[in-house]
Image (cartoon, rainbow, N blue to C red):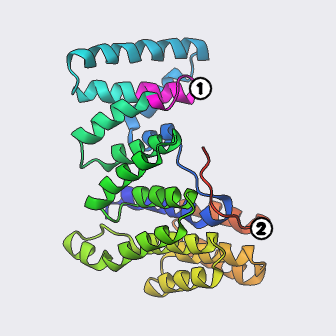
């Protein structure tokens, strides 16, 4: 597994480790897209120096320009990406609505089925506008070809939980784990079993099935004692249960095993006051 992808997975699972306590939310579209578009980051930094009204006008002009290109060349991917990026930036300024990114995302997802981020972003966008069936279809399109895709798994689980279908979420994750060995034989590293186990444990925790959650975390820990992620998840659950001493030991262990860049965040979680566990809800 490449180091950039591994680092992204660590970031995701740091989030997964607290979902059971702070709620499941969709990654903001603009932020999610920028994680994979370094060139966009550069242009965004340049624009951030402009007054917001001037920035808004500039982005709107760019969006019109890309739209005109697409009238002549509807499958021009450079124009599609440019239109998507400018509209996402406009959304970050509070201009327009999520519907504006649906069409370019649908086109890009269809033209680039191997680039799952477009399909995941499409699912997120549809979920935000209330098209839950459309979101589920987009997530499934990713999971059919890449059952271990963490972005799609996290999004689908969040969707199922907002629909009050925790058993369906649990079944999805259990099915992913049951086929992980075969998938990883065919394509090594395609399913991060520890990450999926952490997410499964968090779903159990969100339903207050704490014994089952701890059992899943323990199984993940026993499978790989050098992986800090299930240790962190278990620490957070024990902390919420008022078992501060046990949790503290695990937080310390997780911090020692984690890459340096994640230790401050783990230590922050360790020192925070516990908050009541809540059933995950989607922040619209």
| Location of mark 1 (residue) | 94
| Residue 136 magenta | no
Residue 183: x percent and y percent? 26, 72
Position above or below: 253 against 118: below
Residue 231: x percent and y percent? 57, 77
Q: Which mark is residue 44?
A: none
How packed mark 1 is, by other alpha carbons closer than 10 Å (few <14, some 14-19, many 20 or more), is few
**Residue 225 visible here:** no
SS of the residue at dot 2? loop
Q: Which mark is residue 274?
A: 2
Q: CA distance from mark 1 to mark 2?
A: 33 Å
- The number of callouts visible is 2
**Residue 107 visible here:** yes
Residue 193: x percent and y percent? 40, 74
Quadrant (top left/top right/bottom left/bottom right) for the C terminus: top right
- Asked if the residues shown at circle 1 and circle 2 are in contact, with their CB atoms under 8 angstroms apart, the answer is no
| Residue 98 magenta | yes
The magenta segment? 85-99
Residue 127: x percent and y percent? 49, 45
Q: Earlier in the sequence, mark 1 or mark 2?
A: 1
Q: Residue at x 36, y 60 (%)?
A: 149
Depth check, mark 1 against mark 2: the one in front is 1
Q: Residue at x 45, y 58 (%)?
A: 156
Q: Residue at x 49, y 27 (%)?
A: 89
SS of the residue at dot 1? loop
Quadrant (top left/top right/bottom left/bottom right) for the N terminus: bottom left
Position above or below: 174 against 28: below
Magenta part mainly helix, strand or loop? Answer: helix
Q: Residue at x 28, y 34 (%)?
A: 107
């Amino acid at each position: 597994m490449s180091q950039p992808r591994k680092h992204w997975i660590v970031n995701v699972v740091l989030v997964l480790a607290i979902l059971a306590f702070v709620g499941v939310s969709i990654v903001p579209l603009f932020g999610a897209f920028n994680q994979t578009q370094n060139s966009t980051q550069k242009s965004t930094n340049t624009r951030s120096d402009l007054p917001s009204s001037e920035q808004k006008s500039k982005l709107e002009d760019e969006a019109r320009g890309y739209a005109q290109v697409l009238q002549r060349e509807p499958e021009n991917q450079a124009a599609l990406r440019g239109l998507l990026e400018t509209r996402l930036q406009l959304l970050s300024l509070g201009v327009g609505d999520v519907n504006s990114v649906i069409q370019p995302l649908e086109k890009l997802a269809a033209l680039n089925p191997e680039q799952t981020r477009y399909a995941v972003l499409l699912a997120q966008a549809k979920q935000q506008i209330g098209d839950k069936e459309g979101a589920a279809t987009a997530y499934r399109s990713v999971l059919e070809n890449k059952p271990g895709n963490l972005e799609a798994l996290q999004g689908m689980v969040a969707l199922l939980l907002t629909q009050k279908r925790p058993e369906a979420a649990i079944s999805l994750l259990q099915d992913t784990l049951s086929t992980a060995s075969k998938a990883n034989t065919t394509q090594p590293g395609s399913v991060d079993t520890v990450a999926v186990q952490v997410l499964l444990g968090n779903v159990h925790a969100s339903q207050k099935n704490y014994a089952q959650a701890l059992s899943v975390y323990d199984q993940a820990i026993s499978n790989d004692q050098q992986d800090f992620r299930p240790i962190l998840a278990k620490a957070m659950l024990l902390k919420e249960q008022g078992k501060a001493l046990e949790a503290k030991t695990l937080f310390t262990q997780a911090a020692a095993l984690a890459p340096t860049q994640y230790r401050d965040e783990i230590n922050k979680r360790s020192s925070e006051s516990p908050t009541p566990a809540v059933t995950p809800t989607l922040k619209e």
